[in-house]
Image (tube, coloured by chain):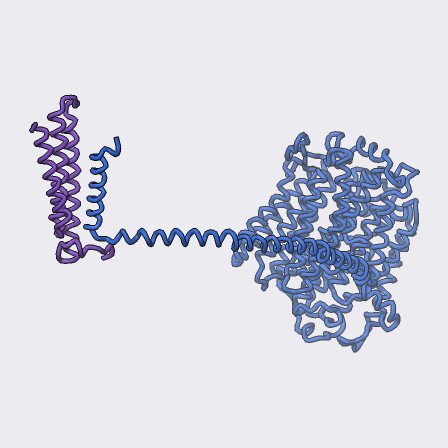
Amino acid sequence: MQLSATHLWMIPALPLLAAAIGSLTPRGGRQLAAGTAIAAMLGAFVLSCGALVTALAQPAVHGYANFAWFTLGNEVVRVGWLLDPLTAFMAVMVTFVGALIFIFSLGYMKEDQNFTRFFCFLSLFAAAMLGLLVVNSLLLLFVCWELVGLASYLLIGFWFHKPAAAAAAKKAFLTTRIGDLGLLLGLLWLYHVRGTLLCYDGGAGVLEQGSLTALAGTTVAGGFALSTAIGLLIFCGAIGKSGQFPLHVWLPDAMEGPTPVSALIHAATMVAAGVFLVARVYPLMLADQALASVPVHALTVVAGIGAITALLGAAIAVAQNDIKRVLAFSTVSQLGYMMLALGVGSWVAAIFHLLMHAFFKALLFLGAGSVIHAAHHEQDVRRLGGLGRRMKATFATFAVGTMALAGVPFLFSGFWSKEAVLHAAHAWPVSSLPLLVGLVAVVLTAFYMTRLITGIFLGAPRTDAAADAHENSAVMTGPLLILAACAIGLGFIGTPAWPWLQSNLGGIVVELESIWEAPGLMLLSIGLVVTGLGAGWAVYGRRRNVNASSVDPLAQAAPGLFAVLAARLGFDEFYAATFGRANAWVAALADGFDRRVWGGLVSLLARFGEFSGLLNREADEDILNRGFDRASAAVRGAGQTYSRAQAGETHGYLRTVALAFVVFALVLLLGGVR
Amino acid sequence: MSPLQGCLLLSAALFSVGLVIALARSNAILVLLGIELMLNAANLNFIAFWRFHSGAAPATGVIFVLFAIAVAAAEAAVGLALVIALYRHQKNLRLQEATRLRG
């Protein structure tokens, strides 16, 4: 089956339809809502596979179908669909992982009252995400981008009756909005300069050669090329959405949402949208590479942000106790890896890591969800333990996910994608810092994952909830097993020996010789993984007689550092003390201005109105009212006088008539009137 | 005395009789009767002027009178209906007592 670019819209349309149906389904229609959502996702998966077949037939060609959306004055706004291997691979990943997570949610959300609403939101999210992937216009991309943000907000705040969840939803929405502002400015600027936001349009698109040459050739303030400025503004959007330093603070809080949401949105797909965006506009980011005069290249900034984020996330993850928060910071760290790969010039490695990460991180989150569901919503590592014996399927799949994330050699997908990133960093001529940071993060990743898995599954149960846990139903373990198989098997589509994914993604044939350029690096990273795992085992694996209140061994060894890391390096407090307080100060200022200046002006006007009202009343009462009173008294008096004539006696009236007749007759007779 | 003068004297007499009846009697029916007499006195004048005046247009006086008779018939119908209502209300027809507009 093949799906051309013209029909690409059907992929997001299916989940959108499911969302529409779900929104109209009453609360009781659980099977209808879940059924349509899962069916739509599977349908979208089939269509995505068709699109992949089409794309792989000509991997180096960007297939697109543009059409006019609407006309505004003389401007015809054109949008379109874009089909290339990047779109197709992403769409297949999103629909496949999405469908599995939808199925897992059947079990996880079974007891929730708002089951239909949940599936409606999930479908809406999937539609927005798939829309973001298939569009050929940065305008439509921005629309979908915001829709994804909306769906994320709705799903983080799904349990909005919990204050923490409502606050986390708000925080995620506002924090990503800061990045989106940059993205919007970048797009506006781009439209202002180029007059179009189509990516590819027969030579006129913004990502094609003519546009890129023009953008790179224009210099703006500070010696930056225009392409650098716009690229960095667009990258702001990616920073917000992909949880990069310094806007990463929303992602760990987003774990207040239901765990399938964390798996789908905040680990596998949505947060990857930022990476996807940078990969999509990669020609624009690359445009300034040839210029020697610019102060900094756009991609250098990307690499720097990515490296900081990778290290930061991994370090903080070491000291977290909530399962989902450990995984959240691990996501932050892995997204940093992807940005790092983009920055050092290998977007193919970044997308490879993105795809692999999506599978094993979804697996880890669903595993965590399985644990949380079994242990009666207990998600503190210190209060679990010993679950491995009773939850064998979850344990085994979680272990696979852990090894994939840590990068255990050869068998696991994470190893190959991480190697690709590290090799790309190694080949970067500008600086070796990203490579160094990446290697340190490798050790930390292996270490905190060992800490997590030993804490949950080994040892003795530390609370009743943990002791009472038992394996979940097949609807939950099934997706885990499938994802675990992917976490093992999928890495082989991108191994150095058979770089099928890389060659198709980039439309380039990778030379086999280039892989073994740095064999020492691979050995080094394997050694670091082993070091991390070993250290984790040494510290946590052989602990005995621990209970829920035992102090973490690291906290004993270095209490100061551990506390700082556990407090997430104080970013939240820092933002609260700076931006939060500045905001409060501005608000207080505005409040005071409103009260004093505007309020004074308004009350002055009110006083004036009051005074003129007083004058008015005096005039009314003294002049008008009294005058009318007197006139009406006179009229009443006259009426009383005349009413005496109307006594009601018929003969009286007749007499009057006769008298009048006589008077008239006399007047006529005596010739008074002639 | 010309026939016109005779007619005018007759009508004046009729009118005076009607006026006296209307003013002097207290029975509502008789008052109505007096009013009819006065109307017919006026009708007689119309006919007389038409008959004995040379410059009058053909049938002018007759048309006036026919109108007056039609109006008088309607008036009599309404007047008699009022008389019946008055009798039902106060069990007699004395106009001196019919002074109130409220029932």
User: Can I make out residue A229 in this image?
Assistant: yes
Residue at the (77%, 39%) spot, across then down: A189
Q: Nearer the viewer, residue A281 or A472?
A: A281
User: Is A290 above or below relative to A94?
Assistant: above
Residue A385: image location, x then y, percent:
74, 71
Residue A605: image location, x then y, percent:
66, 53
User: Is A323 above or below relative to A420?
Assistant: below
Residue A532 appears in which quarter of the rendering?
bottom right
Q: Note the chain letter of the blue one.
A: A
Residue at the (70%, 46%) spot, across then down: A145
Residue A583: image location, x then y, percent:
77, 57
Q: How many marks?
A: 0
Residue at the (71%, 67%) spot, across then down: A379
Left or right? Give the position of A546 relative to B27. right
User: Can I make out residue A483 in this image?
Assistant: no
Left or right? Give the position of A660 relative to A479. left
Quadrant showing the C terminus of chain A: top left
Residue A512: image location, x then y, percent:
86, 42
Q: Note the chain letter of the purple one.
A: B
